Amino acid sequence: MADRRGTSEEIDCRIVYVGPSGGGKSTTVRAVHERLETGTRSALLAPARADGGTPLTDLLTVDLGMLAGRNLRLQLLTAPGEIRRAAVRGRVLSGADGLIFVADSAPDRLEANKDALAAIRLTVRELGHSEIPPMVFQYNKRDLPGAVPEEELERVLNPTGQPAFSSVAYRREGVIEPLTALSERVVRTLA
Ligand SMILES: Nc1nc2c(ncn2[C@@H]2O[C@H](COP(=O)(O)OP(=O)(O)OP(=O)(O)O)[C@@H](O)[C@H]2O)c(=O)[nH]1
Ligand SMILES: [Mg+2]
C-alpha cells in the first residue's frame, strides 16, 4: 500500500519483517539501523518485553532519496510469527508492500519456521488479499553449529525460489542485502 496519496512529494513503502518468534527480526532491524548513516534513517523504536520478545512491532524509517521528483521512504516494521498472535500480525501486515521472512536456522526451529509461514498466508487471506506481497527470505543464525543447511531451508520454505540471503544479524552481517533486493522490487512497481 505504498502511500501515493499522502502528499505529491512523498511516497511511503511498508516493508514488514515476518518469521518465527526469536528468529532475529528485531535484531535485524537494529542492525539495519546501526549500519545506516544517521541522516538516512529515523530513530529506532524497539520496545521489548522482559524476555526480549517484541510486544507489538519495531519501527524504523529509512529515507531513500528522490524518485521521479518525490521523496521515497521505507517504513520497516516487524510482525509476530506465532499463530495465536493473529490480531497483531494482521494490524502490522495490513498495507504491507513487501515482506522479509527471517528464518531461524536452528534445527529445532524448522517447524516454527513452517508454522510462521503458514500463519502469514492465513493472515493475508483473512485481510482479504488473494496473494501475499513480494517476499524475500533471510536465513538467519547461520553461525549456529548444526544450522539447517540452506538447501534444506530452500526446499522446505522457499520452493518457488524467491530471492534468498544468509545472515548473522547480531553481527550485522547479511541484513542490508535482503532489504535492498526487496526495496528495488517494490520500488520498480511504483516507477
Ligand atoms: N546465534 C545467533 N543468534 C542471533 C542471531 N540473530 C539474532 N540472534 C539472537 O536471537 C534472539 C532473538 O532475537 P530477536 O531479534 O529478539 O528475535 P525476534 O524475531 O524479534 O523475536 P520476537 O520479537 O519474539 O518475534 C536474541 O537473543 C538475538 O541476540 C544470529 O544471527 N545468530
Ligand atoms: Mg522482536
Image (cartoon, rainbow, N blue to C red):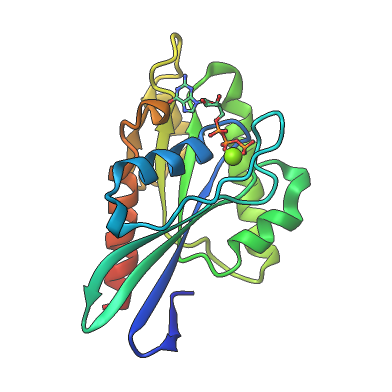
Q: Position of residue 112 (x, y in %)?
A: 63, 31
Q: Residue at x 29, y 58 (%)?
A: 40
Whether residue 135 can be seen here: yes
Between 100 and 133, the residue placed more toward the observer is 100
Q: Is residue 112 above or below residue 96?
A: above
- In depth, the one of 180 and 55 nearer the eye is 55
**95 shown above or below 30:** below
Query: Residue 183, how many percent across, how many down?
Result: 32, 59
Say which quadrant the C terminus sits in: bottom left
Residue at 45 percent across and 16 percent down: it is 147
Q: Is residue 176 left or right of residue 134?
A: left
Judged from this view, the residue extending furthest toward the right is: 84
Q: Is residue 179 left or right of residue 92?
A: left
Picture coordinates of residue 32, whole percent (x, y): 37, 44
Q: Is residue 52 left or right of residue 74?
A: right
Instruction: Indicate the quadrant where residue 185 lies.
Output: bottom left
Q: How many marks?
A: 0
Residue at left 52%, top 19%? 106
Residue 163, visible in the rendered structure: no
Q: Residue 19: give x, y in percent of width and height.
A: 56, 41
